[in-house]
Amino acid sequence: MIASLIMIRKLSVAAAAIGIGITVAATAGSAVEVTCSGGPVEAVTTRTQNVAVSTSSAALTPIPGTVVEAGPAGVGDYDTYVVTFSGQAFGTGGGFWNAQAQYSTNSGVTYTNMTPYPELKFHNGNGAEANSMTWCGRFTSPSVPALIRIVWSKSGGGTANIDKFSTTVVRYN
């Protein structure tokens, strides 16, 4: 069985066991540990963008170019999906911006947040940094390919920016 350990810094939340094969544990410090367990790797899909995008929205909105078609799980089958979003992040006006992975099992009609949630601080301040964040979920998408996307919001005024970014989805049986 393959296990992935995900450390997400700058976060202090209360969490509990979520779903089959996914455990979220809050620590007293500033990190959350998420362990996703799956079977053999069924697919790895990466979407890379080399164009800057920005938002000043305080509401969560999709980041253009982050939708990944992750494939169907199959009838009666639940798969574990591990999503990693990475890129050169920067901002204007101070504050910070959040990111959240979401999945859809109905061709993008509705989306559901992936663990951990709510959205997490992805970037703080104005300086450019290479940041990365990982989420996981276990769900079924029997008749259509699962769609994964990243949404973001800006807090504290100014603009959130991301450049040279990628979204990678690993699907485990």
Image (cartoon, rainbow, N blue to C red):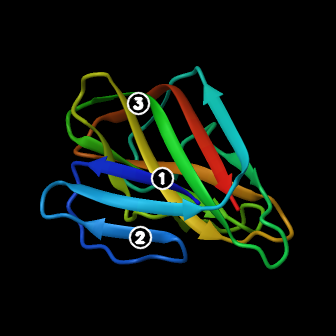
Compared across the picture, whether 137 is left or right of 152 comes to right
User: Could you tell which of marks 2 and 1 lies nearer the N-terminus?
Assistant: 1
Query: In the image, what residue occupies the spot 39% across and 60% down?
Result: 34
Label 2: how many residues lie within 10 Å, few (<14), some (14-19) or many (20+)? some
Label 1: how many residues lie within 10 Å, few (<14), some (14-19) or many (20+)? few
Which residue was labeled with disc 1? 4
Query: In the image, what residue occupies the spot 41% across and 30% down?
Result: 161
Is residue 109 something one can see in this rendering?
A: yes
- Percent across and percent down for residue 156 are 22, 45
Which residue was labeled with disc 3? 161
Q: Quadrant location of the N terminus?
A: bottom right
Task: Please identify the residue farthest to the left as the structure is shown.
Answer: 28
- Closest to the camera, between mark 1 and mark 3, is 1
User: Could you tell which of marks 3 and 2 lies nearer the N-terminus?
Assistant: 2
Q: Nearer the viewer, residue 113 or 28?
A: 28
Which residue was labeled with disc 2? 23
Task: Please identify the residue farthest to the front as the structure is shown.
Answer: 1
Please, what secondary structure does the residue beneath circle 2 have? strand
Q: What distance separates the C-alpha of mark 2 from that of mark 1?
A: 11 Å
